[in-house]
Image: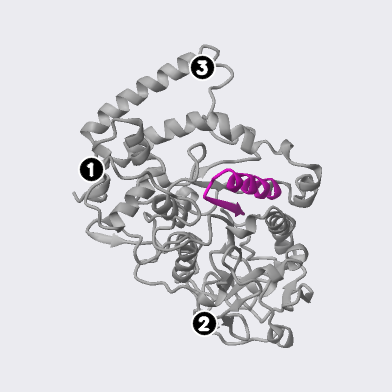
Amino acid sequence: MTDPRTSTHRTAARGCGSRRDFLWTAGGGLGGLALAHLLGVAEARDDLPLPRPELNGGLHHRAKVKRIIQLFMNGGVSQMDTFDYKPELIKRHGEKVDFGLKAAATSVPGNIMKCPFEWKQHGQTGRWVSGVFPHTAECVDDLAFLMAMQSKTNVHGPGSYMQNTGFITPGFPCMGAWISYGLGRLTDNLPSFVVLPDSRGLPYNQGGNFSSGFLPVAHQGTIIRPTAPVPIADLFPPQSAKFITPGSEAEGLALLDTLNRDHLKENSGDTRLEARIASYELAAKMQLSAPEVLDLTKESQETHALYGTEDKTCADFARNCLTARRMIERGVRFVQVWSGMGGPKGNWDNHTDIPNELPFIAGSVDRPIAALIRDLKARGLFEDTLLVWTTEFGRMPFTQGSTGRDHNGGTFLTWLAGAGIQAGATHGESDEFSYKTARDATWCYDLHATILRLMGVDHQKLTFRHNGIDRRLTDVHGEVIEEILA
């Protein structure tokens, strides 16, 4: 069987006897190992410096972005009912237009349906925004829009995989895992890659969207639920276990560490062992750091009011967004915040009733997103933080049933804001119906290449040897979208 890891990684794994070697192997040092591999270093030596993952320590050039918050809208946001204003839909509302026999994914195409919400232009850019995003509309001058995103699929599972990993099938590392692998951790006290799912459940594909795939397991997303009674599972012993004391816990962890290290010597090719050792050490540190990060009572009343943490419409997403800001302040490099769980209801998958379903889900994120933008700017975090808002695909210009819309991989949109982004920029355009892309089509590969560029990484050079292939996040595709870069 082909060993999926580089020779650099194997050499370092065998020499992890000291604490320094252990951190080099299982902690942020994996970023250093990636760097060593990319630079053609034959093996990881003791005299090599520890990784330097700070802002301008990118792998290939000076970075503009230090950390990322990605807001993923699960279910397929209807572009023509949010940010993609199409007068032709208003003009031809109720008409039957022939888009072909296989135009719809799961239904018979209905008549053209205009957006049921009022549109207005906002900001100096005059960006059209529908009435479902009144708060975000006030921030449009800070955003750069990709108006002609495309997907290879109009099915949720493959679409979500593609937007996260660059592939429509499972088993590939997501962008957060690639960034963690390439650049390492900014702090030893918190994970490099954290996932904050919707409080109601995980998205389509469950944890597959934030998997490390064939990369070392230590780089998978750490799931934290800030609104749950127990935000991090098994971080602390249960209250019923009175026999567990700080001393006994330390002794138990020491024994496990010894056993795992002995086992690792005989199984140096198994990254699961390295990840297990890394997780024990990180968990011990998080017992001290995580409670402080998740303690939102330390935030001012003004901040809570800004995000809407007490507003039933958006409280849970607001708490997740506020937690994301607290995490990136304390050294988490990549935080992914999800809106919408898997399933036919309660997310952005508005098959049956756009006029009633979309305002509900949009209202749950609109105020917190606008607050996050303002908060990042007020704290000076926009200078080195990238904010990304996206979804897996869009929706159709014609009806499904009475007032719903079916899946559409032909066009959807993404916006970015913050470090390295040209505020107010627009790239690409859909056709007159917002059915297909018409100009400057953009794929996940281009989005990922652009994000990596901002992080100081050449997407073509960040590779990992797996089953005889030098794999990368962008596969064999991807162009940096220069038009939206500052």
Asked whether residue 199 is in view, the answer is no
Image mark for residue 265: none
**Residue 70 occupies which quadrant of the picture?**
bottom right
Number of other residues with Cα within 10 Å of mark 2, as a class: few under 14, some 14 to 19, many 20 or more: some
Do the residues bearing badges 3 and 1 touch, measured as CB atoms within 8 Å?
Answer: no
Task: Tell which circle, 3 or 1, labels the residue nearer the N-terminal end.
Answer: 1
Q: Residue at the spot x=35%, y=25% of the render?
A: 257
Q: How many marks?
A: 3
Q: Nearer the viewer, mark 1 or mark 2?
A: 1
The range drawn in magenta is 317-339
Q: Is residue 417 magenta?
A: no
Q: Give the Cα separation between the discs numbered 3 and 1.
A: 35 Å
Question: Position of 357 compared to 422: left or right?
Answer: right
Q: Which residue is mark 1?
A: 11
Q: Which residue is mark 2?
A: 440
| Spot occupied by residue 48 in the image (x, y as percentages of width and height) | 31, 45
Q: Residue at the spot x=62%, y=71% of the render?
A: 144
Give the amino acid type for the residue marked by disc 3 in the picture: Pro
| Spot occupied by residue 349 in the image (x, y as percentages of width and height) | 61, 62
Quick one: quadrant of the C terminus?
A: bottom right
Task: Tell which circle, 1 or 2, labels the residue nearer the N-terminal end.
Answer: 1
| Spot occupied by residue 109 in the image (x, y as percentages of width and height) | 59, 78
Asked whether residue 321 is in view, the answer is yes
Give the amino acid type for the residue marked by disc 2 in the picture: Asp
Q: Secondary structure at mark 1?
A: helix
Q: Which residue is mark 3?
A: 246
Task: Tell which circle, 2 or 3, labels the residue nearer the N-terminal end.
Answer: 3
